[in-house]
Amino acid sequence: MSDKDTALRQQAMSEIVTHETTVSGDPYRLSFHHMPPVGLMNDPNGLIQWKGEYHLFYQWMPFKPDHGEKFWGHYISKDLVHWKHEEIALAPSEWYDKDGCYSGSAVSHEDTLYLFYTGNVFNDKGDQEEYQCVATSTDGVHFEKKGPVIHVPDGYTGDFRDPKVWKQEQKWYMVVGAKNQNSQGKVLMYESDDLLQWEFIGPIAGSNENRLGDFGYMWECPDVFELDGTDILLVSPQGLQPDGMKYNNTYQTGYFAGELSFTEPSLEHGAFVELDRGFEFYAPQTFIDNKGRRIMFGWMGVPEQMEQSHPTVSSKWIHCLTVPRVLEWNGEQIIQSPVPELEEMREAVLLHSEITIENDQKAIRGIEGRPIELQIDFEQLDDQFAIELFHYISFSYTKRDGTLTLSRPHLEDKSQTEFRRTVLHEELNKLHILIDTSSIEIFVNGGKEVFTSRMFPQPEDEDILFTSLGETTFSIEQWKLSGYVYE
Ligand code: FRU
């Protein structure tokens, strides 16, 4: 390890110690979502179950609650509920990653854990250069950098990052997010026999590929995998303009479903589908675990979207990840559900069945506070149903126009009292809601739509109110949650 590497690690560790009381005293610190010990957390990286343990790395800027020269932080768990914050995995110490060890992925080969990440560099002229780099480990905690293995191909720009590697029939494949010289976002594919020598195959999807037309200037964090016989490209395109209910965040995340041909190479795909409808969701990554489940973590944030207006900034930290979610294909679309392991956090259940509210707003005895989990099953819904939490955020379904709407205050423009995200949905039968101190994840109808958002209500406000126009009858279950256990 170079002297610079050692020094950077020491500085990051002392930053944690310096601000420990400030961060842990913040009422918005999360109880069952990963957050940084100090500074900024963004994308989940290097997700893998290796030698029985789940590894979760993340983009981390320890020195300020803002973006910059990223480290890879590291959490390990045996069961997705008990987590250990590990030693720093990667620090931006070498010429090829001096301005950030950016996002990437992990694979296991011959008992060795390989991390693929992007070395980010701003050269002497201030231009961005990005390299796909490798680091390896035999104990899963200490990593040895091997340097760049892929340089940017002709016709592309310095925006060239986020390698996701997987194995298929004895060959290794990698997808990388890129911007070409005409400012079109693309996903580039590579192949390799040994994980060190990589051959460029070409773009498999992107803006102006596969009859898509213009679709953004940069595609970040691609992830390619199969779900029940369908090939999925998960990707975060930048540069889409808002289009009615679609694309209302600063940058989007979604997927294309289709069939990947390795000979062409290209992905024959259908329309882009947004994976989440809330205010904060970006740069997710998936992996397959020993049980064969496709599990995804996302970043509960969006780049350049009012980030410095989050109230946690004054407590020296910002952002968190989503809970791990299982992805499944129902024949038409991806459905998402929290991994069942999270049920271990549940305390005793509180159940109310056959509640009817008619043209009224009500509290329901004992349904309050946070962190909690709610399951609501609807028996009848005439017109409109809404749940309002902590006088801050509300979620509603309006039957006559089939709209699901999440609404909360604008983080910057306080005059905009109704800041919303809406999607059309044919019915509402079920809600599954995970509520942490400063986040909410709403799974609609078994995860056909998901709304993920941060929220910053008054910390002491515990009220949850239910409103119905016309008559709504439902049952509700609530669990108070104990939270993740950290070692
Ligand atoms: C996505 C992203 C990636 C990049 C990383 C840098 O949020 O911009 O494209 O690798 O964050 O932290």
Image (spheres, grey):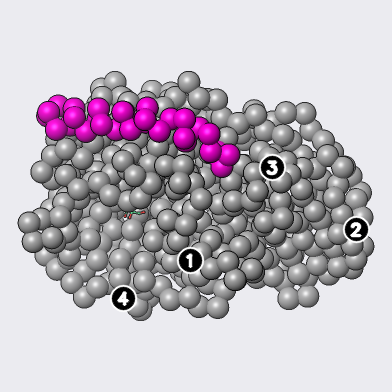
Examine the rendered structure and indicate whether residue 334 appears above or below residue 481.
Answer: below
Among the two numbered marks 1 and 2 on one chain, the one whose residue lies closer to the N terminus: 1
Q: How many marks?
A: 4
In screen coordinates, is 350 left or right of 60? right
Tag 3 and tag 2, C-beta contact below 8 Å: no
Dot 4 corresponds to which residue?
208
Among the two numbered marks 2 and 4 on one chain, the one whose residue lies closer to the N terminus: 4
Residue at 56% in and 42% down: 28
Of all residues, the one furthest to the left in this rendering is: 124
Q: Amino acid at mark 3?
A: Glu
Q: Report how far apart the C-alphas of labels 3 and 1 lie in the structure.
A: 29 Å
Dot 3 corresponds to which residue?
460
Among the two numbered marks 3 and 4 on one chain, the one whose residue lies closer to the N terminus: 4
Dot 2 corresponds to which residue?
357
Q: Is residue 54 magenta?
A: no
Q: Amino acid at mark 1?
A: Asn
Residue at 42% in and 56% down: 308
Q: How would you classify the magenta stretch by its main secondary structure?
A: helix
Stretch of the chain drawn in magenta: 1-30
